Image: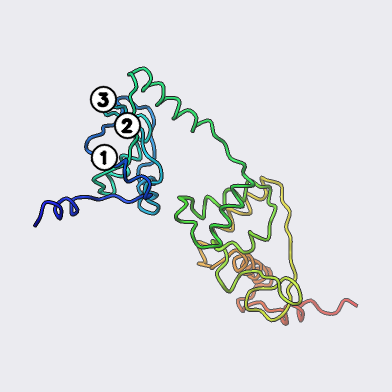
Amino acid sequence: MTEQTEQAKQFTWMGAEQLKPLLIPIEEVQPFPGNPRRGNVQAIARSLDTFGQQKPIVVQASTRYVVAGNHTRLGAIENGWTHIAAVVEEMDDETARDYLLADNKSTDDASYDSGELLTMLQSAANSGTLDRTLYTGDDLDDLLATQGGQETEDERTNAEHAPADDRWVEGEEGLQRSGSTGAVREVRLVFDVESYEKFHTNLRILRSEWGTAGLIETVERAVEYSVEQVRGEEEPVTVDNMNAGLGDDT
């Protein structure tokens, strides 16, 4: 085996092409001593495994301590990388310390526009890529709950809640389910925040218990189950037997 082949075998890294000139052996850099930040290394490792390294870490030249990207380094090690892209910068110890603190603090002070975040997460869910954003379906559900129970068209087509046969599309006769040939009627529920959170929690419990595929199916089954309990019947409730039980009030 040639020396070049041996080096290629030992090299493990993935990321943006523009970062390749910045690659250094990962063993040459060390975590910053006393770094107070505690990050989610497993999540960062997942992101690196999905997208590769898209921005370099920052390393103090004299000490080889990482002043920005300590958990990126750990995530890379978790993934078995031998190299990492780094900007190696000359800075004194005080500057390195203060830069690390400022970098952490600037991230901590960031906030989200919940409406914009919801829109982006719903878009990712609809395209089937929510898992690689590091957000979960529960995160999306919780964010929906904070929006005061306002349902949007994106929510109805949310892939996290609605499989292919349970989505809403614009048909010739108006809003209808995917695969349906006829129009449907829309039911809009409006809650205050506390009531919506309780409603949403109950739906998640029912989905888990019943194994229903989506939000719509869960609501339908919950209504049917409630009617069965009121009527004391075990047979499935249909429109015909419900109408028969109601009689003619005209």
Q: Quadrant of residue 44?
A: top left
Q: Secondary structure at mark 3?
A: loop
Among numbered discs 3 and 2, the one appearing first in the sequence:
3
Which residue is found at the position 32% from the left and 31% from the top?
88
Among numbered discs 3 and 1, the one appearing first in the sequence:
1
Per the rendering, the mark at residue 63 is 3
Mark 1 is surrounded, within 10 Å at the Cα level, by few (under 14), some (14 to 19) or many (20 or more) other residues, namely: some
Q: Amino acid at mark 2?
A: Val
Q: Which quadrant holds the C terminus? A: bottom right
Q: Amino acid at mark 3?
A: Thr
Q: How many marks?
A: 3
| Label 2 with label 1: CB-CB less than 8 Å | yes
Identify residue for label 1. Answer: 24
Q: Amino acid at mark 1?
A: Ile
Task: Looking at this view, name the residue that lies furthest to the left.
Answer: 1
Among numbered discs 2 and 1, the one appearing first in the sequence:
1
Report x, y in % for residue 145.
62, 49
Q: Secondary structure at mark 2?
A: strand
Left or right: where does residue 214 sit relative to residue 1? right
Per the rendering, the mark at residue 62 is none
Viewer-proximal residue, 6 or 208? 6
Report x, y in % for residue 155.
63, 59
Left or right: where does residue 230 sit relative to residue 111? right
Q: Quadrant of residue 245?
A: bottom right
Viewer-proximal residue, 218 or 24? 24
Identify residue for label 2. Answer: 88
Report x, y in % for residue 203.
59, 58
Q: Quadrant of residue 58?
A: top left
Q: Secondary structure at mark 1?
A: strand
Q: Is residue 100 above or below residue 128?
A: above
